[in-house]
Amino acid sequence: PLLQLTTSLAPFTAFRVESIYRTLTGEESGQLNDWPTAGEIDIKLISEMKQAREIVELTHHQRKDQGVKLRQPLATLTYSLVTKLSGEVEQVIAGEVNVKQVIFAKTTTEQGLVDLDFVLTPELAAEGTARGLIRQIQDERKTLHLDRTAQIDVTLPSVPQGWEDEIKRATQIRTLQVGKDFGVEEVSIRKVS
């Protein structure tokens, strides 16, 4: 696969690909090779991904109609089709629409249907709040022109219970404290003389 990739990239990034190709094979040039042949096309997977895309679009429309942002996780998505999608495709859907579980319900119609569970448990609400805070902190980091790896000190009006460590990890926070107002400050590193 790596040799096929280098052969495919050769016309676009010639010098870098030549170096990689020589290192891998010891041959003089990958430019003289035939273009790699395509593998077997998985028609079933293509069909499932098309159905998955439709499910995702319907789900996004339902979220928009209900005013529920994508960063707010939901418990379940139930989709109705004639045949069940593979587990891998269901995982892709779950990740794309931010639900914990994807459930199949058989139907006899060709038109797919989607039903989202909009009931928020305290755990789901806390996770959604934490994700919102992570986004707010990252937006403030961007406003302050801070590198994404720069250590920061953050003050938040409140922190969802059980989410402090995740917020700190995701945003490179050195110190997270609860205070009256939201604030982000870069950590200054002083050299000791």
Image (tube, rainbow, N blue to C red):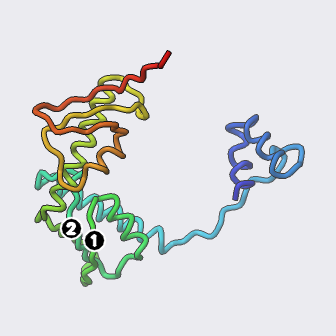
Q: CA distance from mark 1 to mark 2?
A: 6 Å
Rendering coords of residue 123 (x, y %): 18, 62
Label 1 close to label 2 by CB (< 8 Å): yes
Element marked by disc 1: strand
Left-right relation of 193 to 97: right
**Labels 1 and 2: the sequence-earlier one:** 2
Q: Which residue is mark 1?
A: 101
Q: Which amino acid does the dot numbered 2 rest on?
A: Ala
Element marked by disc 2: strand
Q: Which amino acid does the dot numbered 1 rest on?
A: Gln
Residue 171, image quadrant:
top left
Residue 122, image quadrant:
bottom left
Rendering coords of residue 35 (x, y %): 74, 53
Rendering coords of residue 187 (x, y %): 35, 27
User: Is 18 situated above or below 124?
Assistant: above
Q: Residue at x 54, y 71 (%)?
A: 42
> Residue extending furthest front?
193
Relative depth, front residue between 76 and 79: 76
User: Is 176 situated above or below 190?
Assistant: below
Relative depth, front residue between 137 and 116: 137
* Residue 6 disc label: none
Circle 2 packing at 10 Å, graded few (<14), some (14-19), many (20+), is some
Relative depth, front residue between 94 and 147: 147
Q: Which residue is mark 2?
A: 75
Q: Residue at x 25, y 39 (%)?
A: 176
Q: Residue at x 33, y 38 (%)?
A: 173
